[in-house]
Image: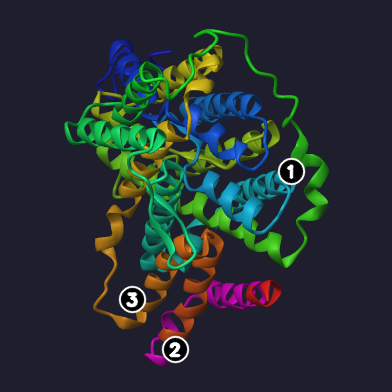
Amino acid sequence: MERYFRFQENDTNIRKEFIAGLTTFLSMAYILFVNPAILSDAGMDQGAVFTATAVAAAAGTLIMGVLANYPIALAPGMGLNAFFTYSVVTVMGVPWETALAGVMVSGLVFILITLLKVRETIINAIPQELKYAAACGIGLFIAFIGLKNAGIVVQSDATLVMLGDLLSGPTLLAVFGLVVTVILMVRNVRGGIFYGMVITSVVGMIFGLIGLPDGIVGSVPSLEPTFGAAFGHLDEIFTVQMLVVVLTFLFVDFFDTAGTLMAVATQAGLMKDNKLPRAGRALLADSSATVIGAALGTSTTTAYIESSSGVAAGGRTGFTSVVTAGFFLLALLFSPLLSVVTASVTAPVLIIVGVLMVSVLGNIDWKRFEIAVPAFLTIIAMPLTYSIATGIALGFVMYPITMLVKGRGKEIHPIMYALFFIFIAYFAFLA
């Protein structure tokens, strides 16, 4: 085993890798409870999604560790689960079964792109500024959902939105959770988001805002309500609306994964000549996990930047991922705790994740108006239209226009022109 994972070559050992794997798990364990809470808003069975989340995370992380030998963990992605529920199912009115089919197709396309080795072409086709803008817009979208779920922001007939009742019990609990989580994050506590959820849940139970769970350890919830649901709806994705949905799933997953892989590998010192060794295997692990997750009953599974916490703890090989995968499987026994993870508990998580995603805002060159306009429209449209797809579509439509007017048409990749017409057709379809 030590020879397979190259412990000596990477200056590590089993103890370091185990601690790193546990650290990574604690840093991202919140997804086990947040993802079912979000997808249940789409009408999906919360228990089944909990099991699908844990199994998809374990499978994807295990494949990443064994196949690519990287200390990178995977799980259903934040932002993509929000897009799945609040944009595709809620706003577009797409059944969750069809949405799962869209996730599965995006994963299959991702596998095809990886096997055909055209990933570099696609990565280079999308302007870096639009990638940053998409990440920022998704961050604002997630944070807005968190503020709404917390009751901090509520609907207003006069101004669309307004400040909610901060003295109501659930809202006070959410504000408390946000403050506690922020303190833990500022103090660089590993697993701060997860511990913030635990503290908030305990305080909620003490003050009677959250009911006590039936137990701590219980049986594993059945996958029957969601397992295989995507297969029976694959024929429903051949519409302009679902094409945009699939493209959005693919776009966000592809670039989120590529960025995470590069960031974590750089931190771990695994880059060779500014290139990522075994990049194809890593992307194949991610895309395969998406297909597995969709078959089980969860939204897109992707690489997690929280893996950097495990790297900081000494993780350097895929054995770190193997350990993390083991903890995800062990977590299946703690399904009774789902009942204490209410909207007041998950709302702070959404807000904090939003903050983390908006951190790349400064990387956009705002002084170049031809870049600033499509980037701004991408960012602002996501929370205001309650749709990640609409934000991406607006940015991708405006970008070729501003660049052509500026006389920089030669810098536009042909793929961007193709996406321009696809998204024009999407807006025509919506109209």
Assign the magenta stretch its main secondary structure: helix
Give the extent of the magenta segment.
Answer: 403-426
**Within the image, what quadrant is residue 365 found in?**
bottom left
Q: Earlier in the sequence, mark 2 or mark 3?
A: 3
Question: With respect to residue 102, does 367 lie above or below?
Answer: below
Residue type pointed to by label 1: Glu
Q: Residues within 10 Å of mark 3 (few under 14, many from 20)?
A: many
The total of numbered circles placed on residues is: 3
Task: Verify whether residue 254 appears in magenta.
Answer: no
Residue 2 rendering spot, x and y as whole percentages? 38, 14
The local secondary structure at tag 2 comes to helix
Residue at point 41%, 92% (across, down): 405
Q: Quadrant of residue 307?
A: top left
Q: What kind of residue is marked 2?
A: Leu
Residue sitting nearer the eye, 116 or 103: 103
Residue 347, above or below 142: above
Q: Which mark is residue 97?
A: 1
Looking at the image, residue 355 lies above or below residue 133 = above
Q: Which residue is mark 3?
A: 372
Estimate the x, y position of residue 126 in percent, counting from the top left. Answer: 46, 67
Label 2 environment density (alpha carbons within 10 Å; few <14, some 14–19, many ≥20): some
Q: Nearer the viewer, mark 1 or mark 2?
A: 1
Q: How far is mark 3 from mark 1, CA to CA?
A: 37 Å
Magenta residue check for 417: yes
* Front residue of 135 and 274: 135
Whole-Å distance between the Cαs marked 2 and 3? Answer: 14 Å
* Residue behind mark 2: 404
SS under mark 1: helix
Residue at the spot 30% in from the left edge and 50% down from the top edge:
274
Q: Residue at x 57, y 58 (%)?
A: 248
The x, y position of residue 289, in whole percent, is: 58, 35
Asked if the residue at tag 3 contacts the one at tag 2, i.e. Cβ–Cβ closer than 8 Å, the answer is no
